[in-house]
Amino acid sequence: MASLIDSGTILLDLDEDGVAHLRFNRPEAANGLDVPFLQSLYTALMRVNGEPSVRALLITGEGAHFCAGGDVKTFASKGEALPDYLRQATQWLQICSSALMRLQAPVVAAVHGFAAGGGGFGIVCAADLVIAGESAKFMLGATRVGMAPDAGGSVTLTQLVGLRKAMEIALTNPTITAAEALDMGLITRVVGDDVVKDEGLALARELAAGATLALAATKRLIWDGLGANVESRLPEEARTVSELSGTADSREGLAAVIERRAPVFVAR
């Protein structure tokens, strides 16, 4: 196995079967997203894109969670500068989610723990296939902290689960079990917690052994069927998230998550 990126918040290896393994590596922050993390993620995805021997990509998270979303402590520390910071973060996240959809190699996400927010839930929606451990949980969570969906989720989620279920998820922020996620079409397969990464790797290897050009073309055709809709919504998602992050409700939402209490929103 060759190590392409062996240190930092994103790790990347390439095995002899043509499977690139990308690992989120901020376990102390539940693999929460900040701008440097997202910049490193984009660099890794471009490295994958530039490696002709890559035939499938597997994404996993180090530590207890796949990705718990944005790094709320970093966001809260920005104060009045939060809109500018989130404008940057959202743009980097959108570039990464678009890169996953446009990558020629099939993308498999193997999820354990929580997949939440734009970073966790959004990347799940942007992956081609998703394997989840039986105790994995999913939460969109944007409106819970006074924000709006990003990473293209305002389009991809509806395509995956349908309009009514997408509205319910986006507006009420339920914690979705792996079994529920499978039933609604959000993910591909549920496996035992102790084998989720192994099963993800096995699926990635199966794809890597397939007809690479045909898989890439098929992936492109399917994503292109909604790709124009996704990409046309990204600027509006970014504008909305940045605008909302300057509100009192957004600051209250972040504080409530950090302090582990229910938020009190005042509509301003």
Image (spheres, rainbow, N blue to C red):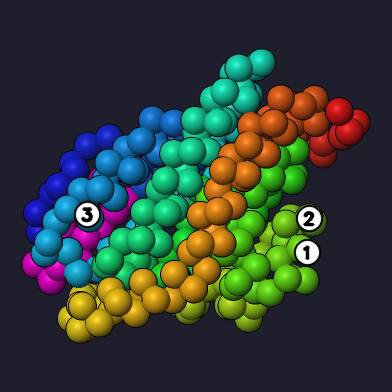
Q: Which residues are magenta?
A: 11-23
Q: Is residue 58 visible?
A: no
Give SS at disc 3.
helix
In space, the residues marked 3 and 1 are separated at their CA atoms by 35 Å
Q: Residue 179 at what x, y percent from top left?
A: 61, 76
Q: Residue 223 at what x, y percent from top left?
A: 44, 70
Going 72% across and 57% down the picture, which residue do you hit? 170
Residue marked by disc 1: 168
Is residue 202 covered in magenta?
Answer: no
Going 64% across and 49% down the picture, which residue do you hit? 149
Which mark, by number, is residue 183? Answer: none
Residue marked by disc 3: 48
Q: Residue 29 at what x, y percent from top left?
A: 48, 36
Residue marked by disc 2: 171
Q: Quadrant of residue 202?
A: bottom left
Name the amino acid, label 2.
Answer: Leu
Looking at the picture, does residue 188 appear above or below residue 14?
Answer: below
10 Å neighbourhood of mark 1: few (<14), some, or many (≥20)?
few
Going 19% across and 43% down the picture, which residue do you hit? 5
Q: Are marks 1 and 2 in contact (CB under 8 Å)?
A: yes
Q: Is residue 194 left or right of residue 125?
A: left
Q: Quadrant of residue 128?
A: bottom left
Q: Is residue 229 left or right of residue 35?
A: right
Give SS at disc 2.
helix
